[in-house]
Amino acid sequence: MGALEYLKHYTYEDYKLWEGKWELYEGYPVAMSPSPMISHQALAAEILFEIKRSIGECERCLVLAEEDYKLSDDTVLRPDVVLICDEPNDAYITKAPEIIIEVLSKSTAKNDEGYKFQKYEAEKVNYYIIIYPDELYAKVYKLKEGKYDKQGDFSSQNYDFEETLCKASVNFDKVFKRFRK
């Protein structure tokens, strides 16, 4: 028997009772602490604001930060920023967001670039953006034929998300401007 066979398998019902910030990867708890650095939270806020500004008065979509995305009863992820449209549930996100943004930190980089990348791709999230706060650029991936296709590295360009219900866009120059030295 492997070591993981001795660990308890958790579900969403267990997850709801935990204090602090956690994610649940196929029944295994993953701590999201310590709290992200101020620059991490500020970048997430800047990109949230940019997307919110771009969708304007669209009433079918919401831009949210740190909201639970329940993929199954034993897998719950908490992206930094999401654009959701026509979401039927008010307790947590149940269907694939149109856009997910993760701001990397040293403690989460492997998960964001590996596990979450694969999960978001499998769930058919239209766009996945990974922000690199130390280098001040973002990698934008677009789902094409069931696989993520890298659209490029963006630091000062504008990117229009052509396949979102509310026609979102991000001006990466505005997102990164205050963090440049």
Image: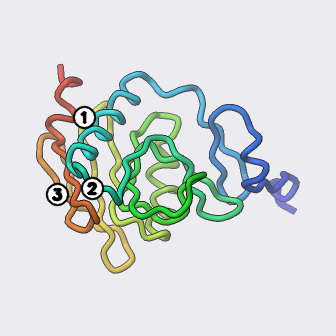
Instruction: Estimate the x, y position of residue 40 in percent, counting from the top left.
Output: 39, 30
Q: Amino acid at mark 3?
A: Asp
What separation in Å lies between label 2 and label 1 (alpha carbons)? 29 Å
Task: Report which quarter residue 126 is drawn in.
Answer: bottom left
What colouring method underlies this structural image? rainbow
Mark 3 in CB contact with mark 2 (< 8 angstroms)? no
Compared with 180, 136 (above or below) is below
The residue located at (37%, 73%) in the rendering is 147
The local secondary structure at tag 2 comes to loop
The local secondary structure at tag 1 comes to loop
The residue mark sitting in front, 3 or 2, is 2
Q: Amino acid at mark 2?
A: Cys
Q: Which residue is mark 1?
A: 136
What separation in Å lies between label 1 and label 3 (alpha carbons)? 19 Å
The residue located at (28%, 44%) in the rendering is 52
Q: Nearer the viewer, residue 147 or 94?
A: 94
**Which numbered dot is residue 160?**
3
Instruction: Estimate the x, y position of residue 112 in percent, counting from the top left.
Output: 47, 49
In the picture provided, is 94 more to the left or to the right than 120?
Answer: right
- Residue sitting farthest toward the left: 157
- Residue sitting farthest toward the top: 181
Q: Which quadrant would the N terminus be assigned to in this image?
A: bottom right
**Which numbered dot is residue 162?**
none
Q: How many marks?
A: 3
Q: Nearer the viewer, residue 26 or 165?
A: 165
Mark 1 in CB contact with mark 3 (< 8 angstroms)? no
In the picture provided, is 95 more to the left or to the right than 84?
Answer: right
Q: Residues within 10 Å of mark 2 (few under 14, many from 20)?
A: few
The residue mark sitting in front, 1 or 3, is 3
Instruction: Estimate the x, y position of residue 99 in percent, counting from the top left.
Output: 35, 57
Q: Which residue is mark 2?
A: 58
